[in-house]
Image (cartoon, rainbow, N blue to C red):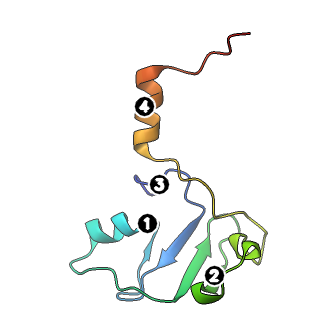
Amino acid sequence: MCKHILNAQVSIRSPCCRRWFDCPECHAENSDHELRKTLEMVFACKKCRKVFRKDIRDYEEVDEYCPHCDNHYIIDAKTAADGMNELATGPAIDPR
């Protein structure tokens, strides 16, 4: 489980070491090398657990969804800092 992106919907296979990570920060913390950049990414959906590839040169809105289960995996990331901000300020109160 990723401590950087709390709502990660996919894992990404690193092209350099072929290990699975939820985010680049997880790769940096658990590897002795830099993450190699690539144009073809390999994802594993956390909802259906199926693997799929995406070419980021030909990326469209429909590619934001898992091709197997239609899980929307391109979403706004929730980070640990977001949770700390909410704890510090408290929940939003509706003034109605």
Front in this rendered view, residue 28 or 63: 63
Q: Which quadrant of the structure image shows residue 64?
A: bottom right
Q: For residue 51, which numbered disc appears in the image?
A: 2
Q: Residue at x 63, y 64 (%)?
A: 74
Q: Earlier in the sequence, mark 2 or mark 3?
A: 3
Which quadrant holds the C terminus?
Answer: top right
Which residue is the extreme one toward the top? 96
95 sits left or right of 42 in the view: right
Q: Is residue 57 left or right of residue 85?
A: right
Q: Nearer the viewer, mark 3 or mark 4?
A: 4
Using the numbered discs, state the Cα–Cα distance from disc 2 to disc 4 in whole angstroms.
34 Å
Of tags 2 and 4, which is closer to the observer? 4
**92 up-or-down from 15: above or below:** above
Residue 62: image location, x then y, percent: 77, 74
Determine the secondary structure under disc 2.
strand
Q: Disc 3 marks which residue? A: 5
- Judging by the rendered image, the residue that carries numbered circle 4 is 85
**Crowding near pointer 4: few (<14 within 10 Å), some, many (20+)?**
few
Q: Would you say the residues marked 1 and 2 are in contact, meaning their CB atoms lie under 8 Å apart?
A: no
Q: How far apart are the alpha carbons under marks 3 and 4?
A: 15 Å
Q: Earlier in the sequence, mark 1 or mark 4?
A: 1
Are circles 2 and 3 on residues that touch, CB within 8 Å?
A: no
Q: Secondary structure at mark 1?
A: loop
Q: In this rendering, which labeled residue sits more in front, label 1 or label 4?
A: 4
- Which is nearer the N-term, disc 2 or disc 4? 2
Of marks 1 and 3, which one's residue comes earlier in the chain?
A: 3
Q: Label 3 is placed on what type of residue?
A: Ile
State the separation of the CA atoms marked 1 and 2. 16 Å
Q: The residue under label 2 is which amino acid type?
A: Val
